[in-house]
Image (spheres, grey):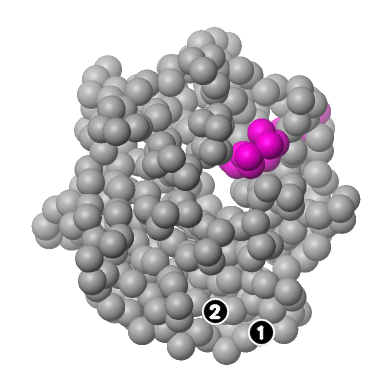
Amino acid sequence: MKRLLLMLPAFLAAACGRDTPLAPAAPLFAKAAPSVTTTDLGTLGGQVSGAVGINPAGQVVGYSQTSNGEYHAFRWQNGTMTDLGTLGGTDSYATGINPAGQVVGYSQTSNGEYHAFRWQNGTMTDLGTLGGTYSEALGINPAGQVVGKSQASNGEYHAFRWQSGTMTDLGTLDGTYSEALGINPAGQVVGGSRISSGQFHAVLWQNGTMIDLGTLGGTFRAATGINPAGQVVGGSTTTSRQYHAFRWQNGTMTDLGTLGGTESLAQGINPSGQVVGYSTTSSGQYHAVLWQNGTMIDLGSPLGTGYNFSLAYGINPAGQVVGESGTGPSRATLWTLK
């Protein structure tokens, strides 16, 4: 599961303010997808798995529990899930894949630290850190530029961009923490940064400048993805202290609404502007959703019965969606819309 989802509850009670032009909540109408095929991608031998990224070729990456209880990064293609191994430790997690099939994520090393990695042609490469003991790679673009976060030598955690063997610190707005969650083909980077007051702001790095993307009225927000057109998605607290998915473009942040609950988060966007993520329903369940053409499509939780949940994390140009769903232990899931 992406870390941002786990961070939300601690920030939902934050105080609210307004510092960016807001578009009205989008005129969304939730409905079931008219034609969708759901595929359980399986596991590496354990009970739990989750899919986080998918490239234009339909190659899927994520994490899975193995038969001995460890968690390993995987790449899935044409029905086969491949264990990508580790950097010498017990666990690894894949977070992104580009059109060339290069995979990024983070893994435990032989000395117990966690480091960002890039996997290519069967080899997992340690990308190092900004001077500390921890790093995560969280996105990669077609050129092989990698973004994520790393502990610096002073103990702070900063967003980074890695290219051709060099990891560059992207800095913060004026606080002590930042992270980069996505990068597009033009090298524009999105993520979040804490400011001196303790608030967490969605940011865009471009041309050497960090831009604060504003908010939906609250004090906590983060950007999770960006497409080639520079459209940014993520989540923000609102004036009513709920947490809603947003799409940002040309200085305007649009509230994407919910499925009737109080919470939603956009996790990915493809070149066509289709957005995926999750929303709570009026009954409080978490459902994977697709936003397109002014409509929110509920992808549901088709891999089980009872208390169903589903979360979508990535979408490719063909509209294939990946995430996780289930009734207890999560399973890596592929939704194919027709």
Helix, strand or loop at mark 1 = strand
Q: Which residue does the image show at 44% across and 72% down from the upper left? A: 292
User: Which percent across, then down, holds residue 304?
Assistant: 14, 53
Of callouts 1 and 2, the N-terminal one: 1
Q: Which residue is farthest left? A: 305
Helix, strand or loop at mark 2 = strand
Q: Amino acid at mark 2?
A: Asp
Q: Which residue is mark 2?
A: 255
Asked whether the beta carbons under mark 1 and mark 2 sit within 8 Å of each other, the answer is yes
Number of marks in picture = 2
Which of the image's four quarters has the N terminus?
top left
Q: Which residue is mark 1?
A: 22
**The quarter of the displayed image where residue 255 is located:** bottom right
Would you say residue 62 sits in the magenta stretch? no
Q: Residues within 10 Å of mark 2 (few under 14, many from 20)?
A: many
- Closer to us: 42 or 79: 79
Above-or-below relation of 40 to 167: below
User: Which percent across, then down, holds residue 25?
Assistant: 52, 86
Above-or-below relation of 116 to 247: above
Q: Amino acid at mark 1?
A: Leu
Q: Which residues are magenta?
A: 138-153
- Closer to us: 185 or 31: 185
Q: Which residue does the image show at 29% across and 33% down from the upper left? A: 78
- Closer to us: 154 or 78: 78
- Closer to us: 142 or 283: 142
Which secondary structure dominates the residues rendered in magenta? strand
Which of the image's four quarters has the C terminus?
bottom left
Q: Which residue does the image show at 36% across and 66% down from the upper left? A: 289
Q: Is residue 232 visible?
A: yes
**How far apart, in angstroms, are the residues tagged by discs 1 and 2?**
8 Å
